[in-house]
Amino acid sequence: MLLTVTLSLLNGFGMTLKLFALTLLFSLPLGLVMSLGSMSKVKVIRWPIVFLIWVMRGTPLLLQLLVIYYGPGMMLHNNIWGAGDGGRFTAALVAFVINYACYFSEIYRGGIQSIPVGQYEAGQVLGMTRGQIFLRVILLQVIKRIVPPMSNEIINLVKDTSLARVIAVYEVIWAGQAFIKSDGILWPLFYTGVFYLVFCGLLTALFGRLEKALDYFR
């Protein structure tokens, strides 16, 4: 029985990892672009991004999943996500990417704005362009400063993937809960916690090593 449960949970956790990895892949660069847009001096660019960030940070991710998955079909009478598991996963991924990009953008913005203006001015005196100053002088310092808050958000993302089950995305908690209905046993649901604890522990150790590697900025 233990082997059967473990294999089922591993299958569900594979979907959890897929959603986690793809969310990071798309939301990290999108968050950086959004942070730069939110600091733009062009109001037409800045205000729509600021408004989107405000909405996404001010409403529950669970609500966003429901709206993004069911909204287009109800308003446009056309399921743009497609049918089946692939469509549900795509809708969940879009919701997660937008949500976390908004959170990451605020972390990026805080890191960028924490760099003293004098460093930009020093780069200009040396004849560097704004792009060169950002990539060669500012970016590594920003990374150093944002690692702690970013690591917290990424670990939260691991646990938030469980919310995808609200639109019937088969993830590890769904797999554990299925045994309650089929076999009348509860322990597989607690067993899912082991998967989260191990994975979050590995991420914590990884971010700890990353922080130490960036100590040369101290």
Image (cartoon, helix red, strand yellow):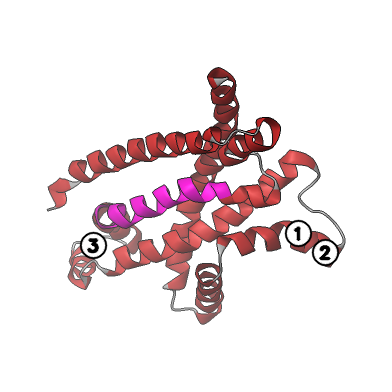
- Residue neighbourhood size for the residue with mark 3, other residues' Cα within 10 Å, grouped as few (<14), some (14–19), many (≥20): few
Q: Is residue 85 visible?
A: yes
Relative to 115, say whether 156 is above or below. Answer: above
- Image spot of residue 61 (x, y percent): 57, 61
Relative to 40, say whether 96 is above or below. Answer: above
Q: Which residue is mark 3?
A: 127
Q: Which residue is mark 2?
A: 74
**Disc 3 residue type (three-letter):** Gly
Residue visible at 19% across and 66% down in the picture? 119
Q: Which residue is mark 1?
A: 70
Tag count: 3
The residue segment tinted magenta is 142-162
Q: The N terminus appears in which quarter of the rendering?
A: top right
Considering the whole magenta stretch, tell me its main secondary structure.
Answer: helix
Relative to 147, say whether 112 is above or below. Answer: below
Q: Say whether disc 3 or disc 1 marks the residue closer to the N-terminus.
A: 1
Q: Is residue 168 magenta?
A: no
**Disc 2 residue type (three-letter):** Met
Q: Say whether disc 2 or disc 3 marks the residue closer to the N-terminus.
A: 2
